[in-house]
Image: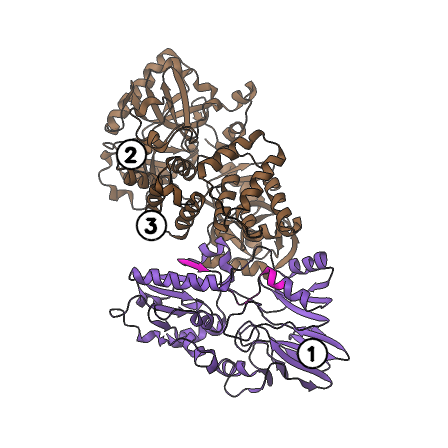
Amino acid sequence: MTLNELVIFHMKAFADLYTAIDETTKTNAKVAALMNYFSIVNEKDAIWCVALLIGKKPKRTIKTAELKSWCIELAGISEWLFEESYNVVGDLAETITLILPPSSQRKDFTLHQTMETLMNLDKAEDLQKRMFVQNTWEQLSTSERFVFNKLITGSFRVGVSQQLVIKALAKQYHLEENVVSHRLTGKWNPATITLKELLFADNANDDHSKPYPFYLAYQLEQLPEELGDINEWQIERKYDGIRGQIIIRDKQLFVWSRGEELITEKFPEFNVLVSLLPEGTVIDGEILPMKNGKPLPFHVMQTRIGRKNLTKKILADAPLMMMCYDLLELNGIDQRNEKMENRRKQLEKLLKDAALNNSQLPLVISPVLECKDWEETKKERSRSREYLCEGLMLKRKDSIYEVGRRKGNWWKWKVDALTVDGVLIYAQKGHGRRANLYTDYTFAIWDGEELVPFTKAYSGLTDKEILQVDNWIKKNTIDKFGPVRSVKAEQVFEIAFEGIQPSPRHKSGIALRFPRIARWRTDKSPNEANTKEDLLQLIESLKVR
Amino acid sequence: MLKFDRFGIFCEQAAVYIDPWKPVDKAIITHAHSDHARWGSRHYLAHHDSIPVLRLRLGADISVQGLSYNEPIMMNGVKISLHPAGHIIGSAQVRLEYEGRVWVVSGDYKLQNDQVCVPFEIVKCDHFVTESTFGLPIYNFPVPKIVHDDINNWWKTNAEQGKNSVIIGYALGKAQRILKHLDPSIGGIYTHGAVANINLRMPENIDLPETKPAFDFIRKETSGALIIAPPSAIGTPWLKRFEPFSLGICSGWMQLRGARRRRGGDRGFVLSDHCDWSQLNIAVRETGAENIYVTHGYKSIYAKWLRDEYKLNAVEVDTLYEGENIEENKPEENEQAEQLL
């Protein structure tokens, strides 16, 4: 034990880090706060901090309802008053922190012991859980209680990206960022590994399942002409599925999502690849529902993605394939620093060879669009929806495969969103930054004489507009049901979205994909809003040819 | 004895309104914030210390009578007196007694002693009208001493880093409270015009540290200064002259993380001139009133709590009072800020 550990309060150090990150928007200040934290706490706390900040959360062992009731008991208030308070605060961990009576003692809790105790409560008796939580509350300061509650609820969202954690670790431990990035990916358990072991492992390939960090593109903001000679670019469609990596190593298959979740079991159709692809292969692509070589709408895949039990019928109704974009590893050798043209040639050859051995190969190569000039590219982009695509991908032919979201060599060029005008009919208070303001809206369209709700939307307005709408809602409420207010059907909003599907579950009979508010149409009256008929026609017109 | 009508809180027997939001013949004003002291009535009655600000805001030529605390007057058989509300300078609870029944309209109030205004006094009554701005158990304000120390430490740290400190609070009330507890040995203190304007109209005995007007601030020569400005100054070019600076916001709403982040300050200080949850509960119970009228804030929730928990006859009342509002500025401060920029 070092001198530092004797004098610091670990949970306070973690709470201070949280506050420091929370209170600034400046990247440098966040990196400095992280480095400071790594320098003062022990190795075990540091690894837990990294795990939590990059979104690796252990299984939750305490239910929301339990937490709530233990807080209500200590505070001596009624449940309805707790619920009203929660509606205003918009965050459970914070509500509990604010309602609990002040603590009487102070004790040091380390992050790793706290996390390990929480994990071990999995099979504990209710009483044991309650004792642990209430005792801990009584020995923590307010800011410590807040992070402790966050550790329990697992909703650990704070203004720090994985990239930022990587940056801080690289600076603190004098490593290259892409090295840190690779070592943080994949499967590792903060309870069984230390930060040094993770960062300084002799051989980063110890863990065969480990994916490469994904290379992500930004939306193209300039004119494509500004990218220069079209012959230097490879144009592909941007498919709408689950971006993932297929890994064959050590005679095993691993499938990773872009969110770095290991999702192998969800895709039994890929099992065959173990015998079809050579040892040491990593492919980057988009997992899509496909039949007869044609993509099916995204919602076809949604019906099976949450299921534990994949029956034959489900597999037959929603067959999945990977649309392959890139080759990251071949024969166990990292290909990322090769030029994309070369990687592409290797990928084509790999898939061709595999297809020779199996006509049902669940891999397809993402076709390259032959465009003579940027005008032609624009035409292809405008046809994206016919192919169930979100737009185009523009990739420089000589680009290497970079780490994280980068500008310059790869761009996504999405089509403009579809829009519909809806009438605001219900509102509810938001969460986090929008707590205590009415920011969660439900919109309706006309079905004959009746307004039927068809979508919710949370984002898209400016802070100023949010205040104006909030104010309007408070003055024009017709009725309240719990946290929801129904308001006069007067305000029209333009809703942008990426896709539209028939949906028997919704009263309106349709469901939107990625709805958000495009504009507040103060110039329109409610009777100018769209109708159900309009949307059904839109669905027809978008059907794949 | 009192009714809530479309002009405000009305005592028919005395033919007087309390804090009316439309012009009336006779108006008793609890305090000089614009949501309580509105323009256009023929005669005003208020505490002596409110009068200079009322004249500034409602017109130099208004007809206004001043009263001291605990100085009863009779109006058509109704005994009326003002009692300290502890909210801001000159703020008063209005006590009305007629035929043995006592009503108290508390306006805005707090139980914390801010050492600027006369502290709140419990007035026994049968009917108590209370605000509920922070009427939820999530609002538990820290001891003021801790907050004032935090402000001074923040200022000192900023000064050491060569930064100025801009602190935001209402021009009337909050600004003087902040000022009163600053440690002038840390650096120079400057005030926005709207704040300076109010400071000029404060009674002499409150003894505030010396300040300079913001237009005397010379960027090249000054660093580590503290500037007190109203909420309307946030996001305006006026602030640019103080760069580099850290922005601190003083409000009860700063207790909530969402509000802190939304408001975009570098630091939030939980400092309010309203009651928090426990202060409200203490005040309501100690008045001994059986009938409680809950106005601006979480009124339906707080009234339900009073009925459920203390078995009081509590009802919610619609008024146009706003309480503490950091999302929008009090309109008169906006106007003054614009004139003074």
- Quick one: label 2, few (<14), some, or many (20+) residues within 10 Å? some
Amino acid beneath label 1: Leu
Q: CA distance from mark 1 to mark 3?
A: 57 Å
| Identity of the residue drawn at 53% across and 31% down | A120
Q: Sequence order check: which comes first, mark 2 or mark 3?
A: 3
The coloring applied to the image is: by chain
Looking at the picture, do discs 2 and 3 lie on one chain? yes
- Taking depth in this image into account, of A528 and B170 the one nearest to the observer is B170
Q: Position of residue A422 (x, y in %)?
A: 54, 50
Counting every numbered tag in the picture gives: 3
Q: Which residue is mark 2?
A: A178
| Identity of the residue drawn at 77% across and 78% down | B100
Q: Secondary structure at mark 3?
A: helix
Judge whether B176 appears above or below A363 on screen. Answer: below
Chain letter of disc 1 in the image: B
Q: Which residue is mark 3?
A: A29
Chain A color in figure: brown
| Identity of the residue drawn at 24% across and 29% down | A337
Chain letter of disc 2 in the image: A
Magenta part of the chain: B266-280
Q: Report which quarter residue A369 is drawn in.
A: top left
- Taking depth in this image into account, of A130 and A216 the one nearest to the observer is A130
Chain B color in figure: purple
Q: Position of residue A143 (x, y in %)?
A: 48, 50
Magenta stretch contains residue B39: no
Amino acid beneath label 2: Asn
Location of the C terminus of chain A by quadrant is: top left
Amino acid beneath label 3: Ala
- Quick one: label 3, few (<14), some, or many (20+) residues within 10 Å? some
